[in-house]
Amino acid sequence: MSELHQAAAAGDFDTVEEILLHNRCDPNQRDIDWSHKTPLHWAAAGGHAESVQLLLAHGARPCLQTELGWTAAHFAAESGRLGVLRLLHVHHAPLDRPDRCGDTPARVAQIYGHTECALFLKKAELECQAYRKMAAQKGLTLDDVDEEWTEDGKENQDNVNNI
């Protein structure tokens, strides 16, 4: 786990800021020992909205997924972090992305009893889809797909089909 991962998990805004300002760590670095979590995943899970904002401002990609397909939104939903979910939504994070089991952040929030988050996410899912459609019509490119995770998923599916 990098120093940035640790600072993001602890909600240590000053250290996160110091690391990012001096380019000491890629904000999208995946921690292979922790299911490929990025610093953004850790900050979102802890509800550290200021660190989430800072990471996003320094290029953290909210579409990146862990080995099981969880985005920062899944982690925020699991722990009931409505403020972080709202922040991710403002930054056009893909709040409707399913994990390997097919669960979206809204479903995760529902499973963990975070009703307010689940209601927000149901509405946000529709807004994400509308934004994606509008972007496609206008020819805008979106950063809402984790290419590495998508490729891994295809490889895993190919392995299952060959058994």
Image (cartoon, grey):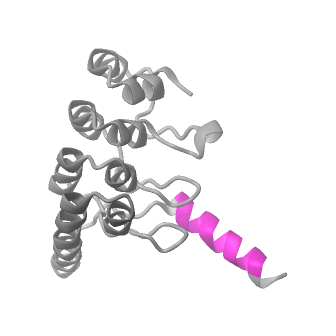
Question: Dividing the picture into quarters, in which one does residue 137 lie?
Answer: bottom left
Q: Quadrant of residue 162?
A: bottom right
Q: How many marks?
A: 0
The x, y position of residue 84, in whole percent, is 23, 45
Identify the residue at horizontal 17%, vertical 64% (top origin). Answer: 120
The image quadrant that residue 127 belongs to is: bottom left
Residue 15 to residue 141: above or below: above
Residue 92 visible in the picture: no
Q: Quadrant of the N terminus?
A: top right
| Picture coordinates of residue 47, whole percent (x, y) | 28, 38
Q: Is residue 17 left or right of residue 123?
A: right
Q: Provide the major secondary structure of the magenta segment.
A: helix
Q: Name the quadrant of the C terminus.
A: bottom right
The verdict on residue 91 being magenta is: no
Name the residue located 32 percent from the left edge and 54 percent from the top edge: 77
The spot of residue 24 in percent (x, y) is: 44, 20
Residue sitting at x 17%, y 78%: 130
**Residue at the front extreme?**
113
Where residue 58 sits: x, y (%)?
Answer: 29, 35
Residue 79 to residue 43: above or below: below
**Residues rendered magenta in the picture:** 148-160
Q: Residue at x 27, y 31 (%)?
A: 51
Q: Is residue 83 left or right of residue 107?
A: left
In-front residue for pair 38/70: 70
Left or right: 73, with 99 as reference point: left
